[in-house]
């Protein structure tokens, strides 16, 4: 599992580049991603495996955003080095982390519901396609079976008429299949949005 830096404000570009993707367990932020981790705080020099000499020696608080023992993300707050994290600030930051966890969880649930809805739409479309293909095939099968039984009894013109009906149904089936292939882009859009 990897943390991705999604939002930042006034971070040094070198920090943004280095911290764009941090594996769980690596560096200070990666250790905070462990859902069993409580709030972590310290200074970059004490806790980071990555060193940035030109970056201020600020302290920071890392709050894991979790839902049912699953890490959703990590919030990082920076403050002047040497400033203590008093109980009131700690409670406030814990409340922010709980709200952040709830918001991320709702976003994930909404995304899962949208995906389920898209898949249901694809299922309905597939059932419709199957119906459209099955009808001409059933007609073709019936006519071929009828033609087989009747060919011996029919004159040449009647046999040609039966064969033309079969050809027309095969053309109809071909058009349905072509229409489906033209809708492939629409299906991709439905499934991947």
Image (cartoon, rainbow, N blue to C red):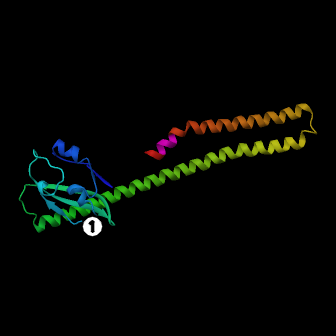
Q: Which residues are magenta?
A: 186-190
* Left or right of residue 18: residue 122: right
Q: Dot 1, crowdedness within 10 Å: few (<14), some or many (≥20)?
A: few
Q: Relative to 2, say whether 174 is above or below.
A: above
Q: How many marks?
A: 1
x and y percentages locating residue 24 in the rendered image: 28, 57
At a point 15% along the width and 61% down the height, the residue shown is 41
Q: Quadrant of residue 193?
A: top left
**The N terminus, quarter of image:** bottom left
* Left or right of residue 103: residue 164: right
Q: Relative to 147, say whether 46 is above or below.
A: below
At a point 13% along the width and 47% down the height, the residue shown is 52
Q: Relative to 155, say whether 40 is above or below.
A: below
Q: Reply yes or no: does residue 188 show up in magenta.
A: yes
Q: Quadrant of residue 136?
A: top right
* Left or right of residue 104: residue 134: right
x and y percentages locating residue 88 in the rendered image: 12, 67
In the picture of the structure, the residue carrying the numbered disc 1 is: 36
At a point 54% along the width and 39% down the height, the residue shown is 184
Principal secondary structure, stretch drawn in magenta: helix
């Amino acid at each position: 599992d990897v943390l991705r830096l999604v939002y930042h404000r006034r971070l040094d570009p070198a920090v943004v580049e280095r911290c764009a993707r941090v594996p769980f367990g690596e560096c200070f932020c990666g250790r905070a991603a462990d859902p069993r981790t409580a709030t972590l705080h310290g200074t970059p020099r004490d806790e980071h495996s990555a060193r940035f000499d030109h970056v201020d020696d600020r302290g920071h608080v890392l709050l894991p955003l979790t839902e049912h023992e699953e890490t959703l993300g990590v919030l990082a707050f920076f403050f002047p080095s040497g400033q203590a994290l008093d109980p009131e600030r700690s409670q406030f930051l814990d409340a922010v982390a709980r709200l952040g966890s709830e918001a991320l969880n709702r976003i994930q649930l909404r995304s899962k519901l949208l995906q389920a809805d898209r898949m249901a739409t694809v299922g309905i479309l597939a059932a419709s396609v199957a119906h459209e293909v099955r009808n001409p095939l059933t007609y073709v099968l019936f006519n071929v079976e009828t033609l087989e039984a009747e060919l011996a009894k029919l004159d040449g013109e009647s046999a040609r008429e039966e064969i033309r009906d079969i050809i027309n149904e095969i053309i109809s089936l071909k058009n349905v299949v072509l229409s489906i292939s033209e809708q492939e882009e629409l299906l991709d859009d439905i499934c991947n949005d």
